[in-house]
Amino acid sequence: MSKKKIFLGILLIAISGLLIWSAQWATYARPPLPEALTALESDGLVSVTEEPWLTFSPAQSAPSVGFIFYPGGRIDPRGYAPLMRTIASNGYLIIVPTMPLNMAPFNANVADDIMAYHPEITHWIIGGHSVGGTMAAQYTHNHPEIINGLIIWASYPANTADLSELSIPVTLIYGSLDPRVNASSIAERESLLPPDCHYVQIKGGDHHQFGAYKITLDEHYATISEEDQHKQIVESTLALLSKIKE
C-alpha cells in the first residue's frame, strides 16, 4: 500500500471521528437523575406522556390552565420531571417540549404548536429555565395577547424583550448562589420587567438545582438541598398559577 493511500485512510478516519464527535457534542443534553425518571411514571394523580411533547396532566380533572415550560440549554426535558409532576398534581396541564439541539432559541415559537394542539385550554402561562426562560420572555413579548402569565427560572429577558408594560402576572425566581443570574445582573435588567414583577430569591440556591439532571462538582454551588430548592420553586410557581385560576 502506498504512503498516499495510508495517508488518505488516516485522514478519512480522522474526519469521520471529528464528524461523530461534532454530532455528539451538538446533540448532547444533561441526562436526568434517577428521581426525575421515577417522576415520569403515571399514577392516579398525574398522567405522563412523552409524545408529541413531554406532558404532565392531572389524572382526576380536566384543566383549563396550561403551563408551557422551555428547558434550559442542553438539558434533557425529563430533568424537570419532579417539579412539573408536582405542579400538575395541583390541577394544571404542563408541557415541556424538546428543542432542536436542546436549545430553545432554535424553536422559540413551539408554543404556537402546543396551544393549537390543546384547544381545551383557555389560559396559557409560559416559562422556562436559563436560556429557556429568556426565550419564554421573548415569546411573551411577541405574543402578549395570548399569554396570561410569565414565570422565569434563573434567567431574565433579553434586551429585545421589553416587558415593562405587561399587565399580566410575572414571577422571576433565582438562586442567591447563581454566579450568573443574581441580584446584580437582574437589577441591571429590571427596567425590562413590569413594575409589579414578583422577584423570588432562593437563599442558598444555585442555577442547576432548578431541575434534577446530572452536573459536575464544579457546577454545584448550592448550600441547600435539591428538595428544599425544588419546594420553594414549586411554591412560587403555583402562587402565580393560582392567580390565573382565580
Image (cartoon, rainbow, N blue to C red):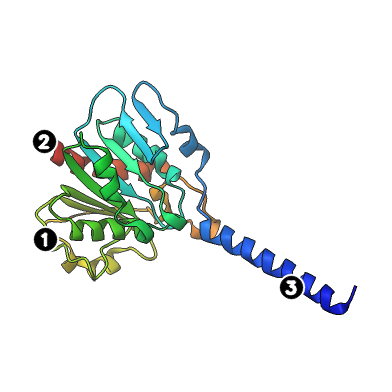
- Tell me, yes or no, if residue 244 can be seen here: yes
Q: Quadrant of the C terminus?
A: top left
Q: For marks 2 and 3, give the one nearer the viewer.
A: 3
Say whether disc 3 or disc 1 marks the residue closer to the N-terminus: 3
Residue contact at pointers 2 and 1, CB within 8 angstroms: no
Q: Quadrant of the N terminus?
A: bottom right
Q: Amino acid at mark 2?
A: Glu
Residue 14: percent from the left, percent from the top? 71, 69
Residue 42: percent from the left, percent from the top? 41, 26
Q: Amino acid at mark 3?
A: Leu
Residue 236: percent from the left, percent from the top? 24, 44
160 left or right of 70 in image? left
- Answer above or below: position of 49 versus 45: below
For mark 2, what is the residue? 246
**Total numbered circles:** 3
For mark 3, what is the residue? 11
The span from disc 2 to disc 3 (Cα, nearest Å) is: 65 Å
Say whether disc 2 or disc 3 marks the residue closer to the N-terminus: 3
Identify the image quadrant of residue 114.
Answer: top left
Kindly identify the residue that appears in the image at 83 percent across and 79 percent down: 4
Q: Residue furthest bottom?
A: 4
Q: Which sits in the foreground, 15 or 195? A: 15
The span from disc 3 to disc 1 (Cα, nearest Å) is: 59 Å
Say whether disc 2 or disc 1 marks the residue closer to the N-terminus: 1
Residue 46: percent from the left, percent from the top? 35, 27
Q: In what element is the residue under mark 1? A: loop
Q: In what element is the residue under mark 2? A: loop
The span from disc 2 to disc 1 (Cα, nearest Å) is: 22 Å
Specify few, some or many for label 3: CA neighbours under 10 Å numbering under 14, 14-19, or 20 or more. few
For mark 1, what is the residue? 195
Q: Amino acid at mark 1?
A: Pro
